[in-house]
Image (cartoon, rainbow, N blue to C red):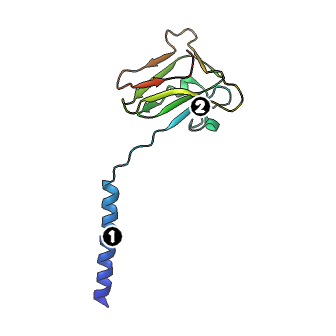
């Protein structure tokens, strides 16, 4: 009886160690996030991860660093005032994308970033930029 219990304990321990080793050695790619910006219904205390929980201001969107494959989408029909200061670390294969999204309210006009006295509406910090911007007006 004792050897049988010892055998099962050893097998169980080996299965556990194999699972632990597999998990430790697995290479998982980080999931790129999409962030939403809507100055009409957004709120800067939101997480920005869906149209329903969009951020409101360029200032809030400027706080984060955007990494490879991430997207910052501006709501169609919105005009954003001020400067978008981006910290971007994209790659050639996975650039950071700034574009627009349709909120489903019928307004198909492209979003606008109005610099409102700033020299540039979008400022990108040095580094591995690889930034792709499309579907909005500056």
On screen, 119 above or below 85?
above
Mark 2 lies on residue? 55
Quarter of the rendering containing residue 60? top right
Name the residue located 44 percent from the left edge and 31 percent from the top edge.
Answer: 66
Residue 41: where, in percent of width, then height?
Answer: 68, 30
Residue situated in front as seen by the camera: 46 or 40 = 40
Q: Regarding mark 1 in the picture, which secondary structure is present there?
A: helix
Comparing labels 2 and 1, the label whose residue is closer to the camera: 1
On screen, 50 above or below 119?
below
Residue situated in front as seen by the camera: 41 or 133 = 133
Quote the CA–CA distance across marks 2 and 1. 46 Å
Name the residue located 49 percent from the left edge and 9 percent from the top edge.
Answer: 119
Residue 128: where, in percent of width, then height?
Answer: 35, 26
33 sits to left or right of 81? left
* Residue that extends furthest to the bottom in the rendered view of this protein: 1
Q: Would you call the spot at circle 2 few (<14 residues within 10 Å), some (14-19), or many (20 or more)?
A: many
Q: Regarding mark 2 in the picture, which secondary structure is present there?
A: loop
Mark 1 lies on residue? 15
Q: Say which quadrant the C terminus sits in.
A: top right
Residue 61: where, in percent of width, then height?
Answer: 53, 27
Q: Which circle's residue, 2 or 1, is located before the other in the chain?
A: 1
């Amino acid at each position: 009886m004792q050897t049988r219990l010892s055998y099962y304990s050893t097998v169980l321990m080996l299965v556990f160690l194999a699972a632990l080793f597999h998990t430790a050695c697995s290479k998982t790619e980080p999931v790129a996030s999409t962030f939403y910006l809507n100055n009409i219904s957004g709120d800067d205390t939101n997480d920005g991860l869906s149209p329903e929980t969009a951020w409101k201001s360029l200032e809030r969107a400027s706080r984060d660093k955007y990494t490879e494959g991430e997207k910052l989408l501006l709501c169609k029909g919105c005009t954003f005032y001020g400067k978008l200061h981006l910290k971007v670390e994209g790659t050639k294969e996975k650039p950071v994308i700034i574009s627009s999204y349709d909120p489903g309210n019928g307004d198909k006009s492209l979003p606008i970033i109005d610099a409102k006295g700033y020299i540039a509406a979008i400022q990108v910090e040095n580094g591995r930029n690889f930034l792709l911007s499309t579907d909005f007006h500056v």
